[in-house]
Image (spheres, helix red, strand yellow):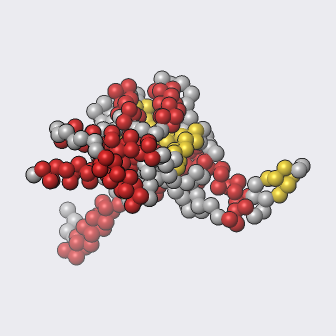
Amino acid sequence: MINLKPEVVAQLERVLGSVEMLLPRAVKPIDWASCSAANWRRHSFSGFLEPVRVTDGTTLDELLGVERQKEIMVNNTRQFLKGLPANNALLWGSRGTGKSSLVKALLNEYAAEGLRVIQVEKEDLIYLSEIFAAVENEPYRFILLCDDLTFEVGELGYKMLKSALDGSVYSAPENVLIYVTSNRRHLLPEYETDKLGGKYVNGELQQSEATEEKVSLSDRFGLWIPFHVFTQDRYIEAVRLCVEREARNRRVEIPWTKELEQDAIKWSHDKTKRCGRTAFQFSKNWVGQHLLSRQ
């Protein structure tokens, strides 16, 4: 038996402790039969899938003002679930208009049919190949969700996502689709100088190299789904639905009044946006104040 000096033992313990911090966390494989969603958690040089409890109960019927968007995404997701050809999708447009809520509603609608969602942050797109390897042999269909995604020029995650969408060695397995939500149509900032460098070829104006590069990522999505702000009538309809849902959850009745409608309109002016998120936030405030006054 080798007798080591106390200072050597202490040094070895420090080294082993440092190495242990770098090693991936030991986790159990996810039981996808009882878990419908997970996040990729980065750890040191790798990461792991962490199961999450789905708390957003949004249904497809509750999403207003996005009927065409729902139709396209429902059809694409149903094709995917049945093993038929389906497209990766980019849901882009104004903030708070229901892009993320639509994906969550799809999970709530089709989880019983085998749909699962894995959410990945932009910084973790470099681990796409590891995520794909973790689920490619599972008997479920996975949506890889990148929520509120934007890039700056030259980011590594941009190149990895581009490769995954392009069918390279990093491409997704047959049971994975990629859904991305973003406020930017092309996921990158656009500048006036991007227009410079265009030229005419055989009498037709060709885009500049800068524009071509910025379009090259979004162009790899088979579906582009635009989301726009609500009309006032549609916004009021969304407010009515949100107030009714909040009241139903609290088991109270809240009458629809002219005062409520006018306050909802004023709220949207203060927020400078008529959208589902604004309607939801107003309903929280109105119902909360109503219940507080009754107490």
Q: Position of residue 180 (x, y in %)?
A: 50, 46
- Figure quadrant of residue 35: top left
User: Who is closer to the viewer here, 66 or 55?
Assistant: 66
Is residue 203 visible in the rendered image? The answer is yes
* Vertical arrangement, residue 256 with respect to residue 126, above or below: above
Question: Seen in the image, is 282 located left or right of residue 66?
Answer: left
Name of the residue lying farthest toward the front = 258
Is residue 77 visible in the rendered image? The answer is no
Name of the residue lying farthest toward the right = 202
Query: What residue do we see at 68% from left, 65% from top?
Result: 192
Query: What residue do we see at 60% from left, 38% from top?
Result: 222
* Vertical arrangement, residue 185 with respect to residue 54, above or below: below
Query: What residue do we see at 19% from left, 39% from top?
Result: 253
Q: Position of residue 187 (x, y in %)?
A: 56, 54
Q: Position of residue 163 (x, y in %)?
A: 59, 47
* Vertical arrangement, residue 50 with respect to residue 80, above or below: below
Q: Position of residue 217 (x, y in %)?
A: 61, 49
User: Which quadrant of the rendered structure holds the N terminus?
Assistant: bottom left
Query: What residue do we see at 78% from left, 62% from top?
Result: 197
Name of the residue lying farthest toward the left = 295
* Vertical arrangement, residue 191 with respect to residue 264, above or below: below
User: Who is closer to the viewer here, 38 or 6?
Assistant: 38
